[in-house]
Amino acid sequence: MIKTQNINGSKMSTRIFPKVLLILGIFASLILLNSCMGMMGMGGGCGMKGHGNHSGHNMQSTVGADTTLIRKGIIEVESIDVNKDGFVYQDQMDWNVISDNPGKCPLCGMELQKVGIEKAKENLKKNGFNVKQ
Ligand SMILES: [Zn+2]
């Protein structure tokens, strides 16, 4: 339709032609963008596939606890006791999960127990964790 007008050589069509192309271009990009957004909204993503590994991570995050509470290496209980009240909150199953605040264990979801620093160290040592003296 546009081509035939152009061949005819009317002044109107030559002026309109670039504009039509521009508008078509904008429309096309808008449609592409919209379909991409729509797909993302439905959880599909824009041509991105293979999010399968994500479900594995969600296993831990569903507990809603802070994974930074999991202590590794040589554990310094004093440094975990930020407010210096002499107490920390320690998981009674995963002994290296220690927080200065009440909360839940990011591994098993159990409530952390309030224990003295020395008690927390004792628990760690008994269960084979490295404790900084
Ligand atoms: Zn735990």
Image (cartoon, rainbow, N blue to C red):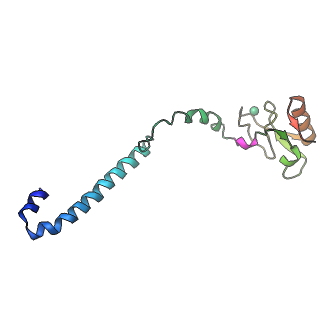
Quadrant assignment, res 69? top right
In the rendered image, residue 88 lying in the magenta stretch gets the answer: no
Quadrant of ligand 1: it is top right
Which stretch did the figure color magenta? 65-69
Image location (x, y in percent) of residue 70: 76, 39
Query: Which is more toward the observer, 86 or 53?
Result: 53
The residue shown at (29%, 54%) is 28
Quadrant assignment, res 96? top right
Q: Is residue 105 above or below residue 83?
A: above
Report the number of numbered marks: 0
Q: Is residue 68 above or below residue 29?
A: above
Image location (x, y in percent) of residue 4: 8, 58
The residue shown at (22%, 60%) is 21
The residue shown at (81%, 46%) is 100
Image location (x, y in percent) of residue 39: 40, 44
Query: Which is more toward the observer, 80 or 17?
Result: 17
Query: Which is more toward the observer, 91 or 16?
Result: 16
The residue shown at (38%, 47%) is 36
Q: Quadrant of the C terminus?
A: top right
Relative placement, left or right, of 37 versus 125 is left
Relative placement, left or right, of 58 versus 104 is left
Image location (x, y in percent) of residue 3: 12, 57
Relative placement, left or right, of 112 versus 118 is left
Q: Is residue 23 above or below residue 40?
A: below
Quadrant assignment, res 93? top right
Query: Which is more toward the observer, 89 or 31?
Result: 31
Q: Quadrant of the N terminus?
A: bottom left
Chief SS of the magenta region: helix
